[in-house]
């Protein structure tokens, strides 16, 4: 099957800035609430960021795991 180019499509522009550059509003919204000094944990099940107020930790087979929710903790345990 051949790929077709559509003449009415606008080119996609990518905002790439060097470290220390400005952020666009989408990037700013993504990192809002996290400072550079704040350590952000990663959910052992889904890989998402773990908010401190919703953090769930479980010790499973002698190892401590961090999850973003009780649902992820449950899914992780079921998968073992």
Image (cartoon, rainbow, N blue to C red):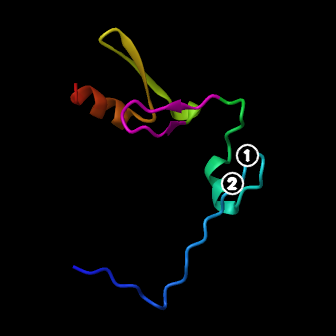
Q: Quadrant of residue 40?
A: top right
Badge 1 is on which residue? 19
Q: Position of residue 49 (x, y in %)?
A: 52, 38
Q: Is residue 56 left or right of residue 21?
A: left
Magenta-colored span = 39-50
Specify whether residue 33 is painted magenta: no
Q: Nearer the viewer, residue 71 or 21?
A: 21
Residue 60 vertical position relative to residue 49 in the rendered view, above or below: above
In the rendered image, the quadrant that contains the N terminus is bottom left
Residue 48 vertical position relative to residue 67 in the rendered view, above or below: below
Q: Are marks 1 and 2 in contact (CB under 8 Å)?
A: no
> Residue 28, which numbered label?
2
In the rendered image, the quadrant that contains the C terminus is top left
Element type at marker 1? loop
Q: Nearer the viewer, residue 6 or 59?
A: 6
> Secondary structure of the magenta portion, mostly?
loop
């Amino acid at each position: 099957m051949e790929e077709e180019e559509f003449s009415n499509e606008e080119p996609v522009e990518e905002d790439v800035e060097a470290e220390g550059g400005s952020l666009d509003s989408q990037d700013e919204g993504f990192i809002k609430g996290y400072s550079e000094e704040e350590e952000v944990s990663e959910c052992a099940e889904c890989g998402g960021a773990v908010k401190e107020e919703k953090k769930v930790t479980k010790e499973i087979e002698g190892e401590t795991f961090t999850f973003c929710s009780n649902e992820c903790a449950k899914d992780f345990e079921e998968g073992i």
